[in-house]
Amino acid sequence: MKKIVLHLLILISPLFAYPQVNEWTPEQQAEFQKQMEDFKVQLNKQMELLHDSLQQMQSQLKEGQGQSFDSLEWNAGIPEVPEMPAVPEMFGDDFSHMEIYAGDDSTEVRIGKWKMTVEEGYGDDRVRFYKDENCCDEEVLEEDLKNIQTKFLLFDIGLNNYFAEGLSSNFPSPYQSLEPNPGKSWVVNLHLFNQRINLIEHRLWFTYGVFFEFNSYKYNNEDVMIPRIDSVALESSEVSLKKNKLAATYVGIPIMLRFETKPGDLNRSFHIAAGGFGEYLIGSHTKTKSTSNDKVKQHDDFNLNRFRYGVTGRIGYGWASLFVNYSLSELFESGTGPVLYPASAGLALEF
């Protein structure tokens, strides 16, 4: 059985090398067409010989001569395969690693990581076709390493807060009402793209990108920020509130150095990154919801600092990381309100 499978695989192997005709000149196409016609004639002859051999094997089996199968004379030869100017990308670069092995009890054909084995047993033969992940790691690794890698639409989600000087949560009077609820204040970062540039042996990377940051600060009191004035001030709501928040949206650029432990396999690599970011305020508003479900939204900058910068860090494994952002610039414009520094932390996903 293994001899039949081996010869069949050799006969059909040119099909995996079907050329990319659109890249050939007309002369190359005509020459290849002629070679394929010749190959077709030879293949038909060999298939006739194969048919005769199979009939001979069937006759021997009927006559009880199954033990002579391995000594059966094989008449089918192998036609000359026309020379291919190009190898296709059906199996990618794996096609260049094609190997055929025929042992005493099995036949194995490998094209890169794809492997087919035929194992002879007592009565039935076993055929397996699978992808061997442990094969050719070094070759594939060398081919996959790129000096520039780009990912799109990455996603971060975490908790928001801000602190007074010295990371204190004790705000000066009359700004005690600005203390947010840290368990209900969220930040969502949407990275339009993130690009990595190899610096040292695909372990140390320079990364940058563009992202939108959506901040939501929720309060447990009924003091609402007053819009369209030159300083930060609050006033008590005339109705009882069950929701009170400040939302601010920024567009920013992160710049970091990133270290990977497994070059070429970033999905299974431990990594750590550190750097900074710069942001610009593109919109903000307050939103309140009364106990009777009446909603009020006020759009204004509320004296928020339009330009913001800070430090950022990440640590993780594969596509999941923990991130921390800390602003070195104040939340509000200098002289308009309390001195507060935003911070956020959460989970970053890098599929």
Image (spheres, rainbow, N blue to C red):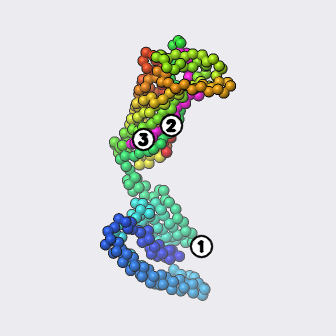
Callout 1 secondary element = loop
- Residue nearer the viewer, 266 or 6: 266
Q: Nearer the viewer, mark 2 or mark 1?
A: 2
Indicate whether residue 180 is drawn in magenta. yes
Of callouts 3 and 2, which one flags the residue occurring earlier in the amino acid sequence?
A: 2
In percent of width and height, residue 47 lies at 48, 81
Q: Which residue does the numbered mark 3 point to in the structure image?
A: 194
Q: Is residue 79 left or right of residue 248?
A: left
- Measuring 44% from the left and 62% from the top, which residue is drawn there? 91
Picture quarter containing residue 277? top left
Which region is colored magenta? Answer: 175-196
Q: Which residue does the numbered mark 2 point to in the structure image?
A: 156
Q: Is residue 263 left or right of residue 120?
A: left
In percent of width and height, residue 121 lies at 57, 71
What's the CA distance linking mark 3 and mark 1? 54 Å
Question: What amino acid is found at the position of numbered circle 1 in the picture?
Answer: Asp
Of callouts 2 and 1, which one flags the residue occurring earlier in the amino acid sequence?
A: 1
Indicate whether residue 325 is drawn in magenta. no
- Residue nearer the viewer, 156 or 125: 156
Q: Residues within 10 Å of mark 1 (few under 14, many from 20)?
A: few
What's the CA distance linking mark 3 and mark 2? 13 Å
Q: Is residue 177 left or right of residue 294?
A: left
Callout 3 secondary element = strand
- Measuring 55% from the left and 16% from the top, which residue is drawn there? 234
Q: Which residue does the numbered mark 1 point to in the structure image?
A: 124
Of callouts 3 and 1, which one flags the residue occurring earlier in the amino acid sequence?
A: 1
Can residue 317 be seen?
Answer: no
Q: Nearer the viewer, mark 3 or mark 1?
A: 3
